[in-house]
């Protein structure tokens, strides 16, 4: 009797995921369900990191903000972890409106039974700023942007140009991991993979910076490189990394669909 797993679309394929430790489970499950053998190379680590005085000041002024903007799921998750340490009632947020970049970020907000007022189709800060400016006048609007240490300032700059009053709250930091001694990295160097999936510019940067530790052997399979969206693709291209396929939306499902189309084009 034939092995039913052999008929799955990613059967026999080795797929590398580069998500931080603790954030890769859903990616692994999705790919393994399709028959893939998954290698986890956590190119970055994301940890909560903030200035306590700044956080206290922000929480004290929450009712004064008209908008809170979350640019990542990590930022939203860490923000509300600290929010619920300080408050036992979600109504302490007041009547603030919420804007987000990315479906994963929106999902964090919706899980709290909060509404997302603005979410651009393209998951980038510039598109979000444009949507906010087209929606209403931002002149003197008090806004809070929740960020990480590597977030670009383009969003804040555009909001300032629209004469908004913008506060930034860095609440997490993203750092490169050292994979030189990682056994999975050793497996990757020796055997390669069919595809490697990048979900952020910082992961692409870490891959580039650790080229020596991740250099493939002569007989290893060279993987196709996949990107979760335009921002990550731009970073990959700037670093000289190939972009063999790209998700049409910045979601896991969309990235998997792009992977399947690239690897098994006759099935689509």
Image: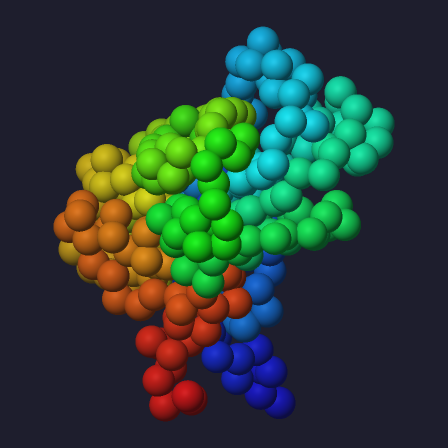
Residue 220 is drawn in which quadrant?
A: bottom left
Above or below for 81 versus 116: above
Depth check, front residue: 38 or 200: 200
Residue 86 location in percent, x, y?
76, 20
Picture residue at 65% right of the left edge, 21% below the top? 61
Above or below for 8 versus 72: below
Picture residue at 19% right of the left edge, 53% below the top? 237
Picture residue at 54% right of the left edge, 40% below the top? 70
Using residue 108 as the reference point, say whether residue 75 is left or right of it. left
Residue 94 location in percent, x, y?
74, 34
Residue 206 location in percent, x, y?
30, 37
Q: Quadrant of the N terminus?
A: bottom right
Picture residue at 47% right of the left edge, 68% below the top? 254
Depth check, front residue: 70 or 111: 70
Q: Quadrant of the C terminus?
A: bottom left
Depth check, front residue: 108 or 2: 108
- What coloring was used for the rendering? rainbow
Using residue 51 as the reference point, say whether residue 217 is left or right of it. left
Q: How many marks?
A: 0
Work out whether residue 183 can be spotted. Answer: no
Work out whether residue 137 can be spotted. Answer: yes
Residue furthest to the top: 53
Depth check, front residue: 123 or 220: 123
Residue 72 location in percent, x, y?
51, 42
């Amino acid at each position: 009797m034939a092995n039913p797993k052999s008929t799955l679309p990613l059967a026999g394929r080795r797929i590398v995921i580069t998500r931080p430790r603790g954030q890769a489970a859903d990616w692994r499950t999705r790919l393994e369900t399709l028959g893939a053998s998954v290698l986890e190379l956590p190119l970055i680590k994301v940890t909560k990191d903030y200035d306590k005085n700044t956080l206290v000041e922000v929480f004290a002024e929450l009712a004064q903000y008209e908008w809170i903007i979350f640019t990542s799921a990590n930022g939203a998750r860490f923000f509300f972890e600290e929010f619920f340490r300080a408050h036992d009632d979600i109504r302490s947020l007041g009547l603030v409106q919420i804007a987000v970049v990315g479906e994963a970020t929106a999902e964090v907000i919706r899980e709290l039974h909060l509404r997302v007022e603005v979410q651009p189709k393209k998951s980038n800060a510039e598109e979000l700023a444009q949507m906010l400016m087209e929606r209403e006048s931002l002149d003197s609007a008090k806004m809070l942007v929740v960020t990480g240490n590597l977030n670009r300032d383009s969003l804040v700059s555009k909001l300032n140009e629209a004469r908004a009053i913008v506060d930034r709250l860095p609440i997490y930091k993203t750092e490169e991991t050292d994979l030189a001694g990682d056994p999975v990295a050793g497996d990757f160097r020796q055997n390669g993979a069919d595809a490697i999936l990048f979900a952020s510019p910082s992961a692409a940067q870490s891959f580039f910076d650790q080229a020596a530790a991740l250099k493939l052997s002569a007989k290893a399979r060279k993987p196709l490189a996949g990107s979760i969206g335009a921002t990550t693709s731009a970073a990959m291209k700037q670093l000289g990394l190939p972009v063999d396929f790209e998700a049409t939306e910045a979601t896991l499902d969309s990235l998997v669909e792009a992977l399947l189309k690239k690897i098994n084009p006759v099935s689509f």
